[in-house]
Image (cartoon, rainbow, N blue to C red):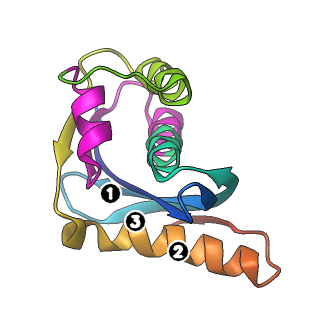
């Protein structure tokens, strides 16, 4: 069974505004980056963008190994607490995304850890790279398998 770390972040310029996510998937044992993902989402809040980064990372891990053990590390206290079951999810868009995230991998295979913003710079940089590329006329989609 494979183990991964997902680092995910969302960005929204205007909140709500132009939004994107960035997701880094690492091999838990080596720390090596396996996949980098980022995409522009259109008009959304930062919290929705954070959830979309989580869903993208979990979906990618499920394609790599549908029984993987995963630690999700995010600087969004809201997402970490909601996905850990400690906080209620009141917003309907986030509730739908949380349900989607919970259905991707087997129950119990995913844990959530809050990390300080400065420890999530890689995912943040990907989210901003996607937005900058899109606003400059590019696709705003990044997918790197390393």
Q: Is residue 143 above or below residue 46?
A: below
Q: Residue at x 36, y 24 (%)?
A: 67
- Lower position in the chain sequence, tag 2 or tag 1: 1
Q: Which segment is the magenta one? A: 57-85
Instruction: Using the numbered discs, state the Cα–Cα distance from disc 2 to disc 3 in whole angstroms.
Output: 9 Å
Give the image quarter of residue 133: bottom right
Q: Residue at x 17, y 56 (%)?
A: 115
Q: Are marks 2 and 1 in contact (CB under 8 Å)?
A: no
- Determine which residue is flagged by label 1: 26
Mark 1 or mark 3, whichever is nearer to me? 3
| Element on which disc 2 rests | helix
| Residue 78 percent across, percent down from the top left | 29, 40
| Element on which disc 3 rests | helix
Q: Residue at x 44, y 25 (%)?
A: 98
Observer-nearest of 48 and 27: 48
- Determine which residue is flagged by label 2: 128
Q: Residue at x 62, y 71 (%)?
A: 130
Mark 2 or mark 1, whichever is nearer to me? 2
- Determine which residue is flagged by label 3: 123
């Amino acid at each position: 069974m494979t183990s991964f770390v997902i680092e995910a972040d969302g960005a929204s310029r205007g909140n709500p505004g132009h939004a994107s996510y960035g997701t880094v998937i690492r091999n838990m044992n080596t720390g090596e980056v396996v996949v980098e993902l980022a995409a522009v989402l259109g008009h959304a809040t930062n919290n929705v963008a954070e959830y979309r980064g989580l869903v993208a990372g979990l979906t990618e891990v499920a394609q790599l190994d549908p029984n993987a053990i995963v630690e999700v590390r995010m600087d969004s206290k809201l997402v970490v607490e909601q996905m850990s079951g400690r906080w209620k999810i009141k917003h309907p868009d986030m509730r739908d995304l949380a349900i989607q995230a919970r259905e991707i991998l087997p129950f119990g295979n995913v844990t959530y850890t809050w990390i300080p913003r400065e420890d999530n710079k890689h995912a943040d940089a990907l989210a901003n790279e996607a937005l900058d590329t899109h606003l400059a006329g590019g696709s705003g989609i990044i997918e790197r398998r390393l």
